């Protein structure tokens, strides 16, 4: 259902509102499965319902089946260089860790690695 009070910053359209977190998470999951759209549920300070935010905080990533990180787990891989850069920027802003983007040597996309 559409909110009367809240609008998308970019679209200017009424936001969808959800009564509780579970409903919002359901909607986010649906959107991811159907449209490959990553949305984040958040509780609105203005109307106190839940909305979904199309924030680029969560960048779609998969695991590389060849490259492993220092801790032995498979590295995240990004399909395009830009996504890897977006992710690197988020990590830098949130954790102050400077990461470098490089192309997977097995052709599985782009990885991030700590800069030395
Ligand atoms: Zn709202
Ligand atoms: Zn790789």
Image (tube, grey):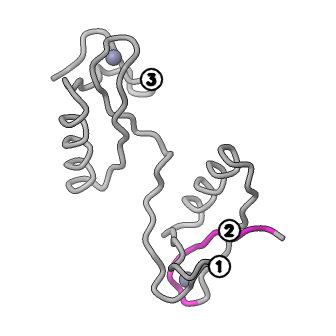
Q: Residue at x 27, y 52 (%)?
A: 32
Q: Residue at x 67, y 74 (%)?
A: 102
Question: Could you say whether the residue bearing mark 1 is in a helix, strand or loop?
Answer: loop
**Within the magenta stretch, is there residue 85?**
no
Residue 114 coordinates in the image, percent (x, y): 73, 68
Q: Reply above or below: 96 against 45.
A: below
Residue 116 coordinates in the image, percent (x, y): 84, 71
Residue 58 coordinates in the image, percent (x, y): 46, 50
Q: Residue furthest left?
A: 1
Distance, label 2 to label 3, CA atoms, is 30 Å
Residue 67 coordinates in the image, percent (x, y): 56, 85
> How many marks are shown on the rendered structure?
3
Q: Residues within 10 Å of mark 2 (few under 14, many from 20)?
A: some
In front: 81, or 91?
A: 91
Q: Residue furthest front?
A: 71
- Write down the residue under mark 2: 101
- Write down the residue under mark 3: 9
């Amino acid at each position: 259902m559409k909110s009367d009070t809240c609008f998308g910053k970019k679209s200017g359209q009424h936001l969808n509102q959800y009564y509780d977190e579970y409903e919002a998470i359901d909607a986010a999951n649906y959107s991811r499965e159907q449209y490959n759209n990553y949305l984040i549920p958040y509780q609105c300070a203005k109307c106190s319902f839940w909305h979904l935010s199309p924030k680029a905080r969560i960048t779609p990533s998969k695991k590389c089946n060849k490259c492993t990180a220092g801790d032995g787990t498979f590295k995240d891989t990004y399909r395009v260089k830009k996504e890897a850069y977006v992710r690197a920027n988020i990590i830098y802003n949130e954790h102050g860790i400077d990461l470098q983007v490089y192309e997977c040597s097995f052709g599985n996309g782009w990885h991030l690695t700590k800069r030395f």
